[in-house]
Image (cartoon, rainbow, N blue to C red):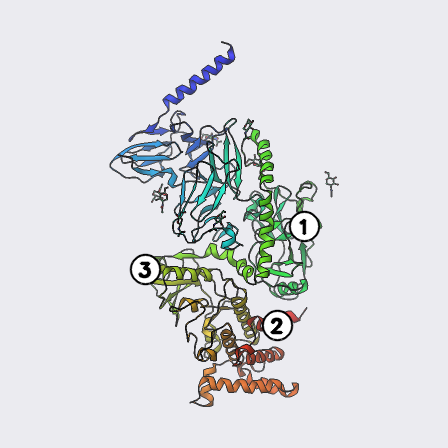
Amino acid sequence: MDAHSAFMFLLALIHLLLQISARDFLSPGSSLSVERSSDVLYSPDGTFTCGFYNISPNSSIFAVWFSNSAEKTVVWSANLGRPVYTWGSKIKLNIDGNMVLQDYGGQIVWTNNVSSSNVQEARLLERGNLIVKGQGDTILWQSFASPTDTLLPNQIINGTIKLVSSTSSNRLLVPGHYSFHFDDQHLLTLFDDEKDISFIYWPNPFINMWAKKRISFNTTTLGVLDSSGHFLGSDNASFMAADWGPGIMRRLTLDYDGNLRLYSLNKTDGTWLVTWMAFTNLCFVRGLCGMNGICVYTPKPACVCAPGHEINDPSDLSKGCKPKFTISCDRKQKIRFVKLPTTEFLGYDQSTHQQVSLSTCKNICMSDCSCKGFSYWQGNGNCYPKSSLVGGVTSQSLPGSTYLKLPEALKVPESSIPRSQPSGRQYGPNCSAENQYSIANFSDISRSGQSESRFFYFYGFLSAIFLIEVILIALGWWFILRMEGRQLTGVWPAESGYEMITSHFRRYTYKELQRATRKFKEELGRGASGVVYKGILKDKRAVAVKKLADISQCEEEFQHELSVISKIYHMNLVRVWGYCSDGPHRMLVSEYVENGSLDKKLFGSEASQTLLEWKQRFKIALGVAKGLAYLHHECLEWVIHCDVKPENILLDDNLEPKITDFGLAKLLNRGGSNKNVSRIHGTRGYIAPEWVSSLPITAKVDVYSFGVVLLELLKGSRVSEWAKTEDEDDEVEKVLRRAVRMLAENVKLQEDSERSWITNFIDSRLNGQFNYLQARTMIKLAVSCIEEDRSKRPTMENVAQMLLSVDEENIIT
Ligand SMILES: *[C@@H]1O[C@H](CO)[C@@H](O)[C@H](O)[C@H]1NC(C)=O
Ligand SMILES: *[C@@H]1O[C@H](CO)[C@@H](O)[C@H](O)[C@H]1NC(C)=O
Ligand SMILES: *[C@@H]1O[C@H](CO)[C@@H](O)[C@H](O)[C@H]1NC(C)=O
Ligand SMILES: *[C@@H]1O[C@H](CO)[C@@H](O)[C@H](O)[C@H]1NC(C)=O
Ligand SMILES: *[C@@H]1O[C@H](CO)[C@@H](O)[C@H](O)[C@H]1NC(C)=O
Ligand SMILES: *[C@@H]1O[C@H](CO)[C@@H](O)[C@H](O)[C@H]1NC(C)=O
Ligand SMILES: *[C@@H]1O[C@H](CO)[C@@H](O)[C@H](O)[C@H]1NC(C)=O
Ligand SMILES: *[C@@H]1O[C@H](CO)[C@@H](O)[C@H](O)[C@H]1NC(C)=O
C-alpha cells in the first residue's frame, strides 16, 4: 500500500467514523452542541446535513445544508440575521417537542413553539425537511413550512410561505429586500419591499393577465418544483430547468440580487449550475440601482447615477443617488433637459400623452414643478412625464429616451450619460473620478472560485438558449406592449400606474379597520354610497374608510369591480389603497385628502373660509377635467363616474383636486348587466337629462355634470341657490337652462360688450381678479357641456385640451 492509498483509506475511515458518531435523529431531552462537529443530523441518504454552520470564526447559524456541494450550500436556517456564538451554543429538543436554540449565555435565540405530549424525535428527512415527529406519523413542526430563501424539490409554496432574499452574496447575513410569495390576487410574485412600499417586478407588471399566462384569484394557492425540474403553480406560473429530467439535485433560490434562479448540482465537482432564471437581463430586476440610479448593461449590469446626481452609499448601490441640485418652483430658474438615449425609468408616470411633439412633452414637464423628467418615444410621439426616477435602465433594445430636467446652470459632462454597450468595452477605468461608473458586484453568484469560469461558460450557454426569451423580455416589455397600448387605446395608460397599485392594493380585515378608525369614531362625511370615516393605518398612513351601503353583489363580482378600481391611478383621482370584505362588511380604504371637499371651500361661509382665488379655481377645473378624461378614455376598462359634484371633488394641501367615489356606480348597481348602470344615481342639479329619459347612460353624463361644476366654480355658488334668488318655485333644471341660454347668447357677442357681462357673471367675491381669457373659455365650455343633446357635448378629453390651451403655465415660455 503506497502512501497515497493509505491516506485515502484513512480519510474514508475518518469519514465512516464521523458518520457513525453522527446521529439519525434527536430524541426528546437531548441536544446538539456547536462545538462538536459530529453533532449533526444526516438525511437517510446523506444528501442533507443539519447542524451548526459557521458563518465566521465566531458566529454560527443552525441550518440545513447540502452535504455534497463543493461548499456546503445552506438551504434553510433557523436564525438567519441573529447568529449564535461558536462556543457554548446548543440546540435542544425539549420533552414537549419544543426545539430551542440557545446562545452561549443561555439566551433563547429561536424556538419552534411546539408543545405536545407525545413527542417522538426530531429527524432530517430525505428531501431536506427537518421535522419534529409525534407518535404515529404526525408532524408537529417542519422546516419546510418556514423556508428562508430556497425551495427544494417537492417543497410546497402556499399562501403562507414566503422566500426572502439575503442582503449579500454569501446568503447568510441579514434578510434582504426582495421576496417571493403569493400576492393579493393569488399570483406567485417577486416583490421589492422598500421602506414603506412594495413593488412587483415579476411577472412583468406592465402586461395584462392574458399576456402573463397566469390565472388570478384561484383561492388554492400552491406551487411546487417537481423532482424533474418542472415548477408549476396554481396560478399557472410555470418554468422548467434547462437540464430537465430525473436524478438531478436542484434548488430554487431567491438570490440577493433579486433574481430567482433554479440551480442544478453537478455531482462530479459539487458546483451549481443555473438552469433557469426569472431575468436573463439583470437590469430589469427592480430596485437594483435605487432612486435616480440607472442600470447599464455593459454587458455586465452596472449601476450609474443619473447625470447631476451623486451616489448615496457606495457600498450599497440599491440606496440610489441624490440630486446635486434643487429646482425651485418659481419660474425664475432656467431649466434645460438632458437627453439620456435609450433609457427608461419604470412607472411613476404622471400622465400619458400620445402623438405629441417633443416640445409639447417638454412643456408639459416644464409646467409641472413635480415633474423630474419625461420619457419620449420619437416614433409614435408617446410622452410620459415622471414624478420619480426609479428603476432606470439603459439598454439598446429600448425604443424611448428619457429627458432629465436639470437647472441650466448645472454642468453635466458627456461622460456621465450612460450608454449601453452589449459587446463593447466596459465602463470604469477612464471616467473622471467624479463620474465614475460603479460596477456592481454581481459576478460572484457562484461561490467557489473554481466554478466561476464554468458558471460564466454556462451563463453564455444559457444566454444562447434563452436568446429568444431575451428578445421577448427586452422588446416585449418595452416595445410590443406600448405598441399594443397605442393600438388598443386604453391598455397601456392604465397599466402604467398598475405596478404601484397592485403592490399596494390589499385586503383589510374588519378588525384592522375598526382599530384604524377607532371604532368608526371620526365621521368625515356621508353620501348615497355610504358613510366615510377617518382612520390611521398601522403604518401611520391617514386613510378614509368608506362603509359601503347596499352592496348586494356576490363576493366574486365585488372582487372583479375592485380589481378595476385597484388599477386606476391618476394624480387627480383619489387613490384607493384597498378594501374590506369581511362577512356583511364591505368597505373601501382610500387616501385621506387634507383639505376636504370643494363644496366646503367654494360655498362655505365667508367668515370661516379663505376664498378660493381665480388661479386655484382654474387649477381645480383643469385637474377635474384631466381626472375624468383619464377615467373615460385611458382606463383599462371604461369607467363612468355618474356622480360628479363638488362634494366628490376633494382638495389636497396644494388645492390640487382629487375626484373620489369613482367606480362605485357599478358596485352599487343592483343586478343588471354592467352597461346598465342603475337609474338615477346622480344628484339633483348635476344630472343630465338622459337620466330621466330612457336613453342609455354614457360618459357624456359626466360631461354634463362637469359643466354644472364649471359654472359653480365661476359663480362661486350652487346652481340650486340660483333658483332661490330668481323664483322660489322654479325647478333647478329650469333655472339652469335659462342661465345657460343667456350665457350662450352672450358668448356670441363681440369683444367689447363682452367684458361687462363676464365680470357680472363671475363670483363677485373675486373683485374682478380673474383671467379674462380663461373665464371666457370656461364659460364657453360649460355651455357646450350642458347641451341637452348629448352628442353635441364635447368629450372630457376635448375639455381637458381646451383648458390646457389657456393654461397660463403653458402660454408663458
Ligand atoms: C472572536 O472572539 C475572540 C474572543 O472573544 C476575539 O478575540 C476575536 O477577535 C473574535 N474574532 C472575530 C473575527 O471577531
Ligand atoms: C414562536 O413564537 C414567537 C413568539 O410568538 C415568534 O416570534 C416566533 O416567530 C415563533 N417561531 C416560529 C418558528 O414560529
Ligand atoms: C402551507 O404549507 C405548510 C407546510 O407545507 C403548512 O404547514 C401550512 O399549513 C400550509 N398553509 C396553508 C394555508 O395551506
Ligand atoms: C398556462 O401556461 C401555459 C404555458 O406557459 C400557457 O400555454 C397557457 O396558455 C396558460 N394558461 C392560461 C389559462 O393562461
Ligand atoms: C386552482 O388551482 C388548482 C391547482 O392548480 C386546480 O386544481 C384548480 O382547478 C384551480 N381552480 C380553478 C377554479 O381554476
Ligand atoms: C460537471 O463537472 C465535470 C467536472 O468538472 C465536468 O466535466 C462536467 O461537464 C460537468 N457537467 C455539467 C453538466 O456541466
Ligand atoms: C481609455 O483607456 C483606453 C485604454 O485603457 C485608451 O485607449 C483610451 O484612449 C482611454 N480613453 C480616454 C477617453 O481616456
Ligand atoms: C465582490 O464580492 C466578493 C465576495 O463577497 C468580494 O470578495 C469582492 O471583494 C467584491 N468585489 C468588489 C469589487 O467589491
Asked whether disc 1 touches disc 3, contact meaning CB atoms under 8 Å apart, the reply is no
Residue 681 point in image, percent of width and height: 42, 74
Identify residue for label 3. 583
Name the residue: 49% across, 13% down.
5
Asked whether disc 1 touches disc 2, contact meaning CB atoms under 8 Å apart, the reply is no
Real-space CA distance between mark 1 and mark 3, rounded to the nearest whole angstrom: 56 Å
Q: Amino acid at mark 1?
A: Ile
Identify residue for label 1. 417
Identify residue for label 2. 807
Give above or below for 531 relative to 473: below
Q: Earlier in the sequence, mark 3 or mark 2?
A: 3
Q: Amino acid at mark 3?
A: Gly
Check disc 3: other Cα within 10 Å, few if <14, some if 14-19, many if 20+.
Answer: few
Q: Secondary structure at mark 3?
A: loop
Residue 676 point in image, percent of width and height: 43, 70
Give above or below for 262 relative to 376: above
Residue at the farthest top position: 1
Name the residue: 44% across, 18% down.
12
Quarter of the figure with the C terminus:
bottom right
Q: Earlier in the sequence, mark 1 or mark 3?
A: 1
The verdict on label 1 being within 8 Å of ligand 7 is no
Q: Secondary structure at mark 1?
A: loop
Towards the viewer: 477 or 732: 477
Name the residue: 63% across, 78% down.
773
